[in-house]
Amino acid sequence: MSREDGILPGLLGSAWLSSLLGVLAIALLLMVVAAPLDLEAQMLFCAICLGATLILRRRAGRLAILAMIVMSTIASLRYMYWRLTSSLGFDDPMDMLFGYGLVAAELYALLVLLLGYVQTAWPLRRRPYPLPADNRQWPSVDLYIPTYNEPLDIIRLTVLAAQAIDWPRDKLNIYVLDDGRREEFRLFCRQAGVGYITRSDNHHAKAGNLNNALRQTSGEFIAIFDADHVPTRSFLQVGMGWFLKDPKLAMLQTPHFFFSPDPFEKNLNTFRTVPNEGELFYGLVQDGNDLWNATFFCGSCAIIRRAPLEEIGGVAVETVTEDAHTALKLNRRGYNTAYLALPQAAGLATESLSGHIGQRIRWARGMAQIFRTDNPLLGKGLALGQRLCYLNAMLHFFYGLPRLVFLTAPLAYLLFDAQIFQAPALLIVAYALPHILIASVTNSTIQGRFRHSFWNEVYETVLAWYIMPPVLLAMINPKLGRFNVTAKGGMIDKGYFDWKMARPYIIVLVLNLLGALVGIARLVFDSDASVTTLLINMAWTLYNLIICSAAVAVASETRQVRAEPRVFARLPVTLHLPDGRSVACETNDFSQRGMGVALPQGVAIAHGESLHVSLARGKDECVLPAKVVFSREQTLGLSFIDLNMRQQFELTRMTFSRADTWASTWGQGVVDTPLVALREVSVIGWRGLRQLFRATSDEVIRHVRRSPVVGSIHSRNS
């Protein structure tokens, strides 16, 4: 389905009728938003809206979701209109400071909410477009694999998978772009039969590396994969058809799918049970952007037409998010961009929390640089929908300060008795609660497959303190700061609590604990205190405690003893034993160096046994030598023995290059239920408190043991 063939334009009809209906709709919306209601009428109005939203949630069709968005918009705008006109009569300077600070954060959150609705209300859901049957009509492709500091094992897997792509051999050229200038990489590329390109400096980092290769190659199209992103065999056949259909299409992006857990999933043990931080973007937001012709280039797993890229001067070098900036430049020149929501590659997520935060800092700084130097609201070449999609992507990374405001706002009243709402408590509830609840239910319905409720607050709480300074710095001077490369493929030998990363939200956690204790004391001992106001602020503080505790749990790093994370997947294999027996079974997981196998009942294979593993798909089969390095009950751990280059290629083709391995888990998790999600986050928050207590106790014990007095006593006793 193309944008031109979509349902939405047909629903809107001609331009003049659309304009008239739009004006009438806005006028009606303003009347509803500004209509004055007393407390009872407002509560009844919002109860009706919330009830209707819950009923529509059960239907969850596209029109039902649009209706939910309308009701959420009305409830949220009514709250903000009331907030700005009826709750800001501040007299005290402290009330004014905290009160206006909270209002600014709320205005930011409302703007992001509404822009998010624009992005996600009607995902395009583009499907692959078929290629001509005659592959002589297929274009030539240069496949780039840029690298700087990744180990050779990671590059080897990506190169072998790239060689397995189903595309005419004379029309596919693979190049490793080595900014590390390493001799072992050059030798591997020569052995594997792929191109090797390097340069004398690292000017403009990854963007400069890609532009250097662009000048030395000549394919009609360029496919780009980060060093750790392993393409499937079908990548080009699935994605290239749209370029032949649309001559103005300059870039097609596919999802970034990860076969290893990120620090949130690893440390919280939520891998494949709770959607990770990036799944909302690749599962829904990019699909929504596609409707507005505003798909972002994400630096990997994408195809770009050479001519438009050369027309804009190559990959953008003005900012550290060269990918999104390149897409913006292409859209400004009138070219189309597209998104195909089918995982056609898989890669490694960041291993440590510090590495993950460093990556997000770079993204945040880059988006702020674009906002400052090439603001999508300004300049020529963009349609309104494109401007709004790019604007929301950039504004998203400004959440640091608003998130910290929301995490500390109730403390203004509990600790300093600041009146940040100049309105009766029940009236606050009547306006604020519907805004919060209806927006939560609506977003849960829209995002349920790719984001669970309350997890966004956990992600933002962990990152808020760290992305706030670089974003503000980039707004002042876009040239300040430096480019940092995200490390992949490392090991964590021993679990530990990352005090350095956790310090900011431990402070916020302690402040909220103090606020809760003060609130309890005031409830018990302060007869003049407003019970309703206290309860509202304490409920808010309790929620902040849950979110901060879950954020603390993320800082408890778990061990990662494998340099090569394993892919958990069920693939049919046959084990050929030395005595001539063959055993049909399934894999539990696999990597470049080995695999875990589930044996049938009643079958036992001894530790140390040498055998051969047969992997088959259709008429294709490969047989690999292996040794049993682990044997327990019905589970075997196999290690491959001295695979040559051809065997490594066949292994990659039969495992990592299979698109069905990734597609089977894409968007197939448990659909969000807000109350269940709140319980999950609360349980993790409780775990975070226990981990913090344990880590604190360990630090105290270590400090005591290192003290001179204890050391002296220990020496005398010895």
Image: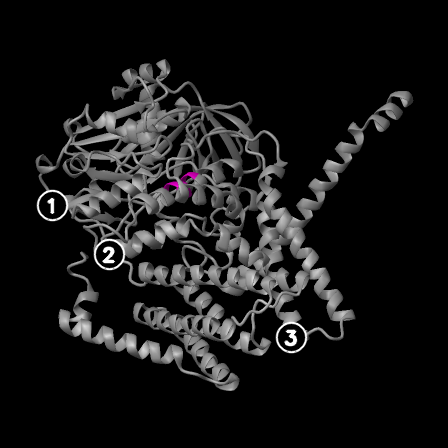
SS label for mark 2: loop
Q: Quadrant of residue 221?
A: top left
SS label for mark 3: helix
**Coordinates of residue 151 in the picture (x, y in percent):** 42, 23
In front: label 1 or label 3: 3
In the rendered structure, the answer to whether residue 674 lies left or right of residue 142 reads right
Mark 3 or mark 2: name the one nearer the start of the chain. Answer: 2
SS label for mark 1: loop
Disc 1/disc 3 C-alpha distance (Å): 63 Å
Name the residue tied to disc 3.
Answer: 532
Name the residue tied to disc 1.
Answer: 247
Tell me if residue 300 can be seen: no
* Classed neighbour count for the residue bearing mark 1: other residues with Cα under 10 Å, few (<14), some (14–19), many (≥20): few
In front: label 3 or label 2: 3
User: Could you say which is closer to the camera, residue 610 or residue 275?
Assistant: 275
Tell me if residue 115 can be seen: yes
Tell me the chief SS of the magenta region.
Answer: helix
Name the residue tied to disc 2.
Answer: 292
**Coordinates of residue 217 in the picture (x, y in percent):** 18, 25
Residues at circles 1 and 3 in contact by the CB criterion of under 8 Å: no
Q: Quadrant of residue 345?
A: top left
Q: Bounds of the magenta span?
A: 362-366
User: Could you say which is closer to the camera, residue 272 or residue 112?
Assistant: 112
Question: Dividing the image into 4 quarters, which one contains the N terminus?
Answer: bottom left
Going 24% across and 35% down the picture, which residue do you hit?
223
Disc 3/disc 2 C-alpha distance (Å): 46 Å
User: Could you say which is closer to the camera, residue 628 or residue 323?
Assistant: 323
* Classed neighbour count for the residue bearing mark 3: other residues with Cα under 10 Å, few (<14), some (14–19), many (≥20): few
* Magenta-span inclusion, residue 207: no
Mark 1 or mark 3: name the one nearer the start of the chain. Answer: 1
